[in-house]
């Protein structure tokens, strides 16, 4: 399945360059390994797409609700989450 999402120019450029190798989104859609994430560059000032896009194959999906068994609600509210990419 191909999943299209907006990406602001600063983050789009980091994906394009290879510096950013992850994406963090609200869990409002289904996504699984093997899907293709199509990031469409979105200009928030003009409120329109720039015409550039990039496609990346999804290799791993981590859902924050799966992490509830590791940390208490209080810890999550105090610290929040960070997503760490590595290669």
Image (spheres, rainbow, N blue to C red):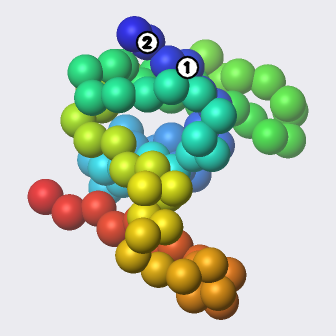
Q: Quadrant of the C terminus?
A: bottom left
Spot occupied by residue 83 in the image (x, y as percentages of width and height) = 41, 66
Dot 1 falls on a residue whose secondary structure is strand
- Label drawn at residue 4: 1
Spot occupied by residue 76 in the image (x, y as percentages of width and height) = 59, 79
| CB within 8 Å, label 1 to label 2 | yes
Task: Identify the residue position indicated by label 2 in the image.
Answer: 2
Q: Is residue 74 left or right of residue 55?
A: right
Spot occupied by residue 56 in the image (x, y as percentages of width and height) = 32, 28
Q: Nearer the viewer, residue 44 or 5?
A: 5
- Residue 71 seen in render: yes
Spot occupied by residue 59 in the image (x, y as percentages of width and height) = 23, 35
The picture quadrant where one finds residue 70 is bottom left
- Residue 9 seen in render: no
Q: Is residue 39 left or right of residue 42?
A: left
Relative to 12, say whether 6 is above or below.
Answer: above
Q: Nearer the viewer, residue 45 or 26?
A: 26
Q: Residue at x 79, y 24 (%)?
A: 48
Q: Quadrant of the N terminus?
A: top left
- Label drawn at residue 49: none
């Amino acid at each position: 399945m191909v999943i299209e999402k907006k990406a602001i120019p600063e983050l789009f450029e980091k994906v394009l360059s290879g510096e950013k190798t992850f994406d963090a989104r609200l869990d409002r859609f289904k996504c699984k390994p093997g899907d293709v994430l199509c990031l469409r560059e979105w200009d928030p000032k003009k409120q329109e797409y720039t015409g550039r896009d990039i496609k990346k194959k999804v290799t791993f999906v981590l859902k924050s609700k799966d992490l509830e068994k590791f940390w208490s609600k209080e810890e999550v509210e105090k610290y929040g989450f960070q997503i760490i990419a590595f290669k």
